[in-house]
């Protein structure tokens, strides 16, 4: 069971409101992370700013490297899903039921035939597989998602759950609903 009072305090300490007076004039590129921006920063040598300033990302000379890297990540996601599923000692039905996804969806993700999971399904799988914070970051990055985004309260809630868990998807959903967010893993 998640201690809601501890979670509230954690959210207050870690959430960054992008509309607050403290954030006025700050570039959210300095805060947010995603595979395209991270890779673009890496190839351009720029940090904490918009690496695409002054040009279309599609016209960047290294855009195809970014595209290839993202396609490679999908293969990594399938491999990671298989690895963590085997490591968990759980059966596939136990995992997809715990995550609240269909057997067909799980099979497509595991085989790599699905382009990428929905963000909420990737989180549901991470919780069903009982990943820790570092594993979850890597798993979600392989799915093509930045995590944590400190300007998204639900990501702060997820962070708390990964750091203080393991928690079930149902326990995470209870915390999300307490804060007014949509449940993950098909449990709306």
Image (cartoon, rainbow, N blue to C red):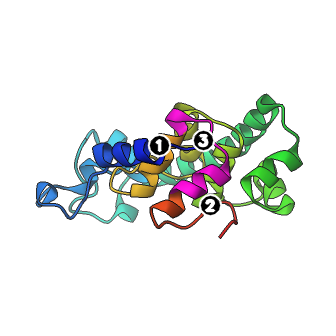
Q: Which label sits on residue 184?
A: 2
For image coordinates 47% across by 41% down, the residue present is 160
Q: Which label sits on residue 159?
A: 1
State the residue in front, 3 or 183.
3
Question: Is residue 161 one of those drawn in magenta?
Answer: no
The residue labelled by disc 3 is 139
Q: State the image quarter where residue 105 is shown.
A: bottom right
Where's residue 153, x and y in %?
Answer: 39, 56
Q: Secondary structure at mark 1?
A: helix
Question: Is residue 172 one of those drawn in magenta?
Answer: yes
**Circles 1 and 3: CB atoms closer than 8 Å:** no
Q: State the image quarter where residue 103 is shown.
A: bottom right
Report the span colored magenta. Answer: 162-175
State the residue in front, 162 or 145.
162
**Circles 1 and 2: CB atoms closer than 8 Å:** no
State the residue in front, 173 or 86.
173
Where's residue 22, x and y in %?
Answer: 12, 54
Q: Which is closer to the viewer, label 1 or label 3?
A: 1
Q: Which label sits on residue 114?
A: none
Who comes first in sequence, dot 3 or dot 2?
3
Where's residue 29, x and y in %?
Answer: 27, 53
Who comes first in sequence, dot 1 or dot 3?
3
Q: Secondary structure at mark 3?
A: helix
Instruction: Report, in whole angstroms, how far the alpha carbon at label 1 lies from the one at label 3.
Output: 14 Å
| Residue 141 against residue 104 in the figure, above or below | above
Instruction: Report, in whole angstroms, how far the alpha carbon at label 3 lies from the one at label 2.
Output: 16 Å
State the residue in front, 45 or 78.
78
For image coordinates 34% across by 50% down, the residue present is 150
């Amino acid at each position: 069971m998640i201690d809601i009072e501890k979670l509230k305090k954690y959210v207050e300490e870690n959430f960054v409101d992008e509309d607050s007076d403290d954030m006025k004039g700050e570039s959210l590129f300095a805060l947010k992370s995603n595979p395209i921006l991270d890779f673009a920063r890496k190839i351009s040598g720029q940090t904490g700013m918009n690496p695409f300033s002054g040009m279309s990302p599609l016209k960047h000379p290294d855009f195809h490297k970014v595209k290839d890297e993202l396609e490679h990540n999908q293969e990594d996601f399938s491999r990671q899903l298989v690895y963590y599923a085997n490591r968990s000692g759980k059966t596939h039905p136990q995992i997809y039921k715990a995550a609240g996804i269909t057997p067909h969806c799980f099979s497509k993700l595991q085989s790599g035939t699905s382009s990428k999971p929905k963000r909420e399904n990737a989180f549901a799988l991470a919780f069903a597989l009982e990943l820790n914070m570092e594993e979850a970051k890597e798993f979600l990055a392989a799915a093509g998602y930045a995590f944590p985004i400190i300007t998204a309260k639900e990501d702060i809630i997820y962070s708390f759950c990964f750091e203080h868990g393991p928690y079930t998807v149902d326990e995470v959903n209870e915390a999300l609903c307490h804060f007014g967010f949509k449940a993950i893993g098909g449990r709306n």
